Amino acid sequence: MTLKRGLFGSSLARKYWMALTGLFLISFLVIHLVGNLTIVIGTADDFNAYAAFMTSFPPIKIISYLLYASILLHAVDGIVLARQNRAARPVGYGEYRGSANAGWASRNMALLGIFTLLFLLVHMKSFWFEMHFGSLPLDANGNKDLFGITVAAFEQVWYSAFYVVAMVSLGFHLWHGVESAFQTMGWTHPTYTPVVQIAGRTLAVVLCGAFAMIPLYVLISPNI
Amino acid sequence: MNLTLKVWRQKNAKETGSFATYQVRDISPDMSFLEMMDVLNEQLISQGTESVVFDHDCREGICGMCSMFINGEAHGPDRGVTTCQLHMRKFKDGDTITVEPWRAKAFPVVRDLMVDRSSFDRIIQAGGFISVNTMGNLPDANATPIEKHDADAAFDAATCIGCGACVATCKNASAMLFVSAKVSQFALLPQGQVEAADRVRNMVNQMDLEGFGNCTNTGACEVECPKGISIENIARMNREYLKASLIS
Amino acid sequence: MSTKLNSRIPEGPVAEKWTKHKGTIPLVSPANKRRIDVIVVGTGLAGSSAAASLAELGYNVKAFCFQDSPRRAHSIAAQGGINAAKNYQNDGDSVFRLFYDTIKGGDYRSREANVHRLAEVSTSIIDQCVAQGVPFARDYGGLLDNRSFGGVQVSRTFYAKGQTGQQLLLGAYSALERQVAKGRVKMYARHEMVDLVVVKGKARGIIARNLVTGELERHSAHAVIVASGGYGNVFYLSTNAMGSNVTAAWKAHKKGAFFANPCFTQIHPTCIPVNGETQSKLTLMSESLRNDGRIWVPASLEDAKAIREGRLKAIDLSEEQRDYYLERRYPAFGNLVPRDVASRAAKERCDAGYGVNKTGEAVYLDFAAAIVRYGQEQANLKGMHQATESEIVALGTKVVASKYGNLFQMYEKITDENPYTAPMKIYPAVHYTMGGLWVDYNLMSTVPGLFVAGEANFSDHGANRLGASALMQGLADGYFVLPYTVGTFLADDISTGPISTDLPEFAEAESASRARLEGFLNSKGSVPVEVFHRRLGRIVWDNIGMARSEMGLKKAIAAIRALREEFYRDVKVLGGMYEMNPELDKANRVADFLELGELMALDALAREESCGGHFRDEHQSEEGEALRRDEEFAFVSAWEFTDGDPGKATLHKEELVFENIKLVTRSYK
C-alpha cells in the first residue's frame, strides 16, 4: 500500500515519473539528433540506413516501446498534474505578477509541453507513420527512402517554420525541465546543482538549436 | 502621499466578492502597509462603511498571520518581509494598489482579505512533530551532539512562519515549501530521524488531501518567502519521500 | 496576610519543597483522567505546553485561541533566549544562582518557593525542547551554545538566533498538534473567551465567541486554565501583538479571581522609537544589542536641539560631546544594567531635553566602537598590521553583521536608516507585565478550579523580569508544574461526571455576554474603538508608565473613569453580532482595558515605594535611584473586584517571606 501510493498515487510520485520519463526522453532526443545530423553531414543513403537500423534492430525496438510508453506517461501525467494545479486555485487573482519571482519557461511548462505534443503528433504522422506503415520507395541499398520525404517536407516553408517554432518551444521546455527533473528526484548538491543547471540549459539550446538547424539547412542548401 | 486602493471585499465564505475602490490621503512613507490599512479602516468607519477585515497580529514579521496579495505579489513588492513589515516608502504618490486575499482551494476566504489556513495545521497534525511526551527525565540535552552544519540547516528550515505566501504565490498553489521545511527540520536532526519515513509519507498524504497543487519547481515560493526558506528543502523532501516509499 | 489568600506553599527547606509536594499531590488514575475535561485558554508557550502535557496524561483538553492557528500566539515573537541552570559553560551557574538572580532581578517582590521551583525545572525544559526537535544554537563541537543575557554574570541563556520564542513555541505547538491528531485535544482556533462560568464556587467552563460566525458557545470542563498572556496593550502602543488582550483574565477577575500587582509592568529599553500618530505597534530590538552597543545622548542641550532639528548628525559629535549616561551612572554594569534601570535612565535624559529624534523621545545605541574593536581584532588575526581605518571598519562591520545581522536588517526595514553607519535610535516601550491573576503555589487562583499560567499570572518575576526568563516561566508552568498541580483540585472530581452546559450559570453568563456585545453594537456613538484605545494608552503611558506620582495617578484614575463613560456613550461599532466582526471584538477588549487601567493606577497609588518597574517619584534617592520600602511593602497586592466597580477594588496582602535570600538594595553602580 505504502509502496503503491509512494510510487503511483501521490503528487510526489507523479512528479517522479515526470522527471524520470522526461530525462529518458532527453536521452532519446540526443540519439535522434545524432541520426538527423546525417542529413547534414552524410548522404541520403546513410540517413536511410540509420532509419532502417533504428526500426529493425531488436534491442532498439524494445527500447522504442519504452519510449512510446514514456511519451504517453509524460503527457498523460503532465495533463493530470496541470489539471490538478488549475483546480488548486479555483478563484484566480485580479492581478498576478508571475514574472516577479519565476522564469517564463518554468511558469509555462504545461503549455510548452502541449505544444510539443501537438508537434510530435504531426511529426510522427509525417515520418514515423510513413516509415512504419506507409509505402515508401526503396533506395539503392534497399532501405526505405525516408530521406526523400524528409527533404520534401522541409522544403515546404510552412512545415519548416512549424518545425523551428516547435523546437524553440521544446528548448524552453528543456531549459527548465532538466534542472527541474533533478530537483524533483532530490538529486541536489550545493556544488553540483549549479553545474546541472548550466548543463541543462546548454543542452536545451544546443539540442533544439541543432534540430531546428536541419530544416533551415534543407531550405537554403541548393544541393539537396 | 495619496493612493487609490482596490481592495477585495467578500462578506463571508459563501458569498462571492468583488473589488471596491477607496482613496486614502496623507499617507506617510514611514507607515507600514497595515498601518495604512488601519487609516483606511478608521476612515471607512467614520463614513459608516464596515472596515476591511484582514489577519494581522504581531506586526513584527514573525507570527505569520498577515496575508495580503499586493499588486500581484504575496506580501507586496519588497523581499524578505511580511505585509506588516512592508513600508509605504515602497510605493509612490498617486499609485493604485490592488489588495487581494491569498487564493487557493485549500485556503478558502473567511472574509475580505482573511483566509482559512487550517489546512496547514492539519498537515502538521499528520506528522509535523516528534513523538515525545513531556517527561522530566529525558536524556540530557547535550547527550547527542549535532553537527553544527545540520543544526543550522534545521534551524533555517524551522524559521518558517506558516504564513502561506508560498502557496499564495505559487502558480499551482502548491504547499511544498511549507511541508518540506517541516520535514527537513526533523530529517536533519537525530531526534527526528526515528519517525522520518512515516512523517514524510503522512504529511505529503495530508497535503494532497487538502487540495494543494503540485510543485513545478518554478522557485517562486523561495523568492516570496518572508523568511527566505530555500527550495533545497523541497529537494530534501523529495529524497525523503522516495526513500520512505522504496525502502521502508 | 489576608484570610482570603492561602498561598499553599509547602513546608520544608526551599530546595525540597517541590519534590516533596509532587510526592504528596493526589494522583488521578488514567481511567479517571479520561472522565475529566480541562479547558485551556491561550496557546502561547504556557497554554500549548499545558494543553499538550495534560492531553498526554489522559485528560480531555479543549484549547482556545483567538488567532487562526495556535502557532501564532505572541510567545512566537520572543527574540533573545531562555534561561536554564544547566551550567554547561562551567561558569559557576547553579539552580540556587538562577533562583537568586531571579529574586534579586525581581527586586524582592516574588515568592521564594515559586521562583526556586522555576529554577529547578528550568533544566528539564531544555531537555524536553531538544527532544522535540527545537533547533537551538550549537557550537562547532555539536553541543548547545549559551550566551550571557540581561545583565547576569553567567552564560545560561539558550537561544536560536533571534527567534528563540518562535522555535520554542513551534515545539510546543507541534506537541499540541500531535494531541489534536490523536483526538486528545479539541482545538478551537478563532475563538475568544468572553466570560468565565463559575458553578457552586468552582470554575466549570467558559463562554467563547466563535470569531468567524459570531456565535456564543458554551464550553464546560472540570477545570479552566487561563494562559492568555499579559495586558501590555492597555498602553495601546507596546511590543505586544495587536490582538493581545486582558479580557480572559479580566473576566476571571470579575468572577472572583484576585488580580495581583497590576502596576508591575516592564518597559523594555531597546525598542524602535515612535514615529507618528498612526503607529499601532512598537518593535523590540533584542536586548542582546546592549552587549556590544553603547547608549548615549549629546552632552549639551544645544547639540541635542540641533540634532532634533536636523542641523547636526550624530557622527558629527566628538567623544567629549557625548554623554554615555549609563556608563557614567552605573560604571560597574554600564550598558548592561537591568531593563527597568536602563529604561528610566533613558526617560530621565529625554525628559531633561536630550532626546535625539523629532519627538524628543529617543537615545542613541551606537555600534561604532564595537565595529572598530571587532575590526581591529580581525585585522590582528589576519596579520594586517598596517590596516587602514576603512579596512578595520569593513572587517568589524562583518563581525557585527554576523552577530546581529537580522536585527540590523529589521531596523533598516522599519526606519530606512543604515545602522552600520549611523547609530540606531531607541526608546523604551511597554513589553511585559509582571502583574496578573493571583495564584497559589499550585498556580490556582482564588476561584477554585481556575488555574493561571505564564504571563497571565503574577507569580515568578516580582517587580521586574530578567531577560530570557519569560520563556522559561511559560514552559515551566505548562510542561512541568500544571500537569502535577491540577491534580490537587481535580482529584476530587473523578466522580463528578460531565458538567452540563445547560446549568443556569452557563445560561446567565451567555446572556450577559450577549447583552454586553449587543450593547456595543447598539451604541449610537460616532467614535471608532481605536480612538478610545489610543487615548487610554496615552493616559496610562503618561501616568502609569516609567515614573508614577501620587498626583499623576489620581489624575489618571479620573481621566480613565471619564474616558470609560465616554466610551459607553460614544463608541461606534459597525456590523453585526453573528458574523466575523473584528471591530466588535476590539470593543470588547478595549472595554476591559478601560477597567484594568484604573486598577493599575489604584495599585500604583497604594504601593508607596519604588521597586523594579514601579517607580514612584516620591520614593527615590538623591541620585534618582529607586527606594524600596521592605518594612512596609514586602507583600503582593491582590485586588478583589468589589461592588461592580474596578475603582472600588479591595486590596488583600500576601506577605512575602524571605528565608533564603537577604533583602538588599539593588546596586549596579
Image (cartoon, rainbow, N blue to C red):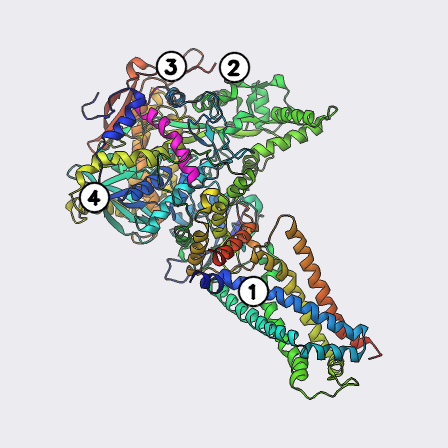
Image quadrant containing the C terminus of chain A: bottom right
Element under disc 2: loop
Above or below: residue C173 compared with residue C594? below
- In the picture, the disc for residue B135 is none
Q: Tags 1 and 3 in contact by the CB under 8 Å rule?
A: no
Above or below: residue C480 compared with residue C627? below
Separation (CA) of disc 1 from disc 3: 74 Å
Element under disc 4: helix
- In the picture, the disc for residue C331 is 2
Q: Nearer the viewer, mark 3 or mark 4?
A: 4
Nearer to us in this view, C569 or B181: B181
At x 84% / y 78%, what residue is drawn?
A: A222
Instruction: Tell me if C301 is positioned left or right of C54 in this view.
Output: right
- In the picture, the disc for residue C627 is 3
Instruction: Tell me if C530 is positioned left or right of A69 in this view.
Output: left
Nearer to us in this view, B4 or C423: C423
Question: Label 1: which residue?
Answer: A18
Q: Amino acid at mark 2?
A: Pro
Whether discs 1 and 4 lie on one chain: the answer is no
Separation (CA) of disc 1 from disc 4: 54 Å
At x 48% / y 51%, what residue is drawn?
A: B178
Element under disc 1: helix
Image quadrant containing the N terminus of chain A: bottom left
Q: Tags 1 and 4 in contact by the CB under 8 Å rule?
A: no
Image coordinates for residue C473, horizontal then vertical, percent: 37, 31
Above or below: residue C556 compared with residue C53? above
Q: Amino acid at mark 3?
A: Leu
| Magenta region, residue range | C108-132
Image coordinates for residue A118, horizontal then vertical, percent: 61, 75
Element under disc 3: loop
Chain label for disc 2: C
